[in-house]
Each structure stands twice: as C-alpha cells, then as structure tokens.
Image: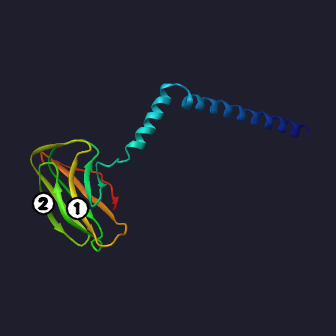
Amino acid sequence: MNILKKYNKTKKINNLTIIWISLVLALWINFLIFGNSNFQNNLKSNILESEKNQNISDIFLEKNQNDITLKTSKDINNVDSLSLSLIYNPENVSITEIIPKLNAEIIKTWEDNWITNIILNYAENYNIKKQDKILTIKLKKKEEKTENINIINSNFTDKSWETFELTNKWITF
C-alpha cells in the first residue's frame, strides 16, 4: 500500500511539472510572437515577404491574355546566351511567335512533338535585372481547356563561357 501511495504522489508531481513547463513555454512563445520585440517584427516581415514573392525559381513564366512572358526573379549578369526548352501539349497548344525583349537574337533550334528548344544569343554581354521580361511567347489554343507549359533544361552561359543552370517553374495556361 505504501508503494502505491508513493507512486500516485510521484505521478501527481510529474503531471504538475509538465503542466507548469507547458504554461511557461506557451507564455514565452506568446511573448516572442506577439510582444513588441525584434524577433516578432522580423517574423512578420518574413511572412509578408514570402507571401509577396512566390517565385523562388530563377526564371518563370507569367500568364497574360493570349501569351506568356518569360521573366527572371534574380539578377543574371554577363549573359552571353540563354537556352531553355518548353514542354507543352501540341495537340491543343501551338506557339505562333517568339519575341525576344532584351536585344537578343533568337534561335529556335528544333521543335519536336512536345518540346521546343530556344536559344537567345546576346550581341554583347548583357545584365538581366530582376523582373525583366526576357521574351514573350504568343500561343494559340485549339480548345478552351487548361494546359500546362513547363520549362526544362534552362541555363545561361556567361562571357567566360561558363554554363550555369537555372531553376524554373511551370505554368497553367
């Protein structure tokens, strides 16, 4: 009997300790998040910034009325050439025109059933700034159904002929 009373007393003390530590931890987290501290201000600004900038890829497609625009989310410096491949459903989507925006010569190397390979050559080393329009692609849809267009194998070559891979993102059109 003595052992059972001792066990129940120890159990109550352990439970009270867990409740006390949980309460202190909850108050500490509440103070950090909702108090007027530097941590709280940084946390709020990081959350707001992440909501604004959802393009974490280096280059991305932006949807317009009847075309898509290729843009960059970062500065890309000393660009000699930029290459990328687009994957789309050719049964419903066709590319009618590709218009470069930044003084580039466009070379459409090949077009297969599902893939179009595009290379942009710049006359001189070019600095592409954040949010610059790289090119506009005019599209024509045969049927009004949702299609995806993906960028794959995107990279750029700088003035020293070193190639850098770029992260990219798909779009629903």
Residue 25: x, y in percent? 63, 32
The residue drawn where x is 25% and y is 64% is: 139
Residue 60 percent across, percent down from the top left: 29, 52
Query: Which amino acid is tagged 1?
Result: Lys
Question: Which residue is farthest right?
Answer: 1
Q: Badge 1: how crowded within 10 Å, few (<14), some, or many (20+)?
A: some
- Can residue 77 be seen? no
State the image coordinates of residue 130 (x, y, percent, origin top left): 25, 42
Looking at the rendering, which quadrant does residue 98 occupy? bottom left
Q: Earlier in the sequence, mark 2 or mark 1?
A: 2
Q: Which residue is mark 2?
A: 107
Residue 138, labelled with which disc?
1
In the foreground, 57 or 164: 57
- Badge 1 marks a residue whose secondary structure is strand
Q: Is residue 170 left or right of residue 24?
A: left
Q: In the picture, residue 116 is in which quadrant?
A: bottom left
The answer to whether residue 71 is seen in the rendering is: yes
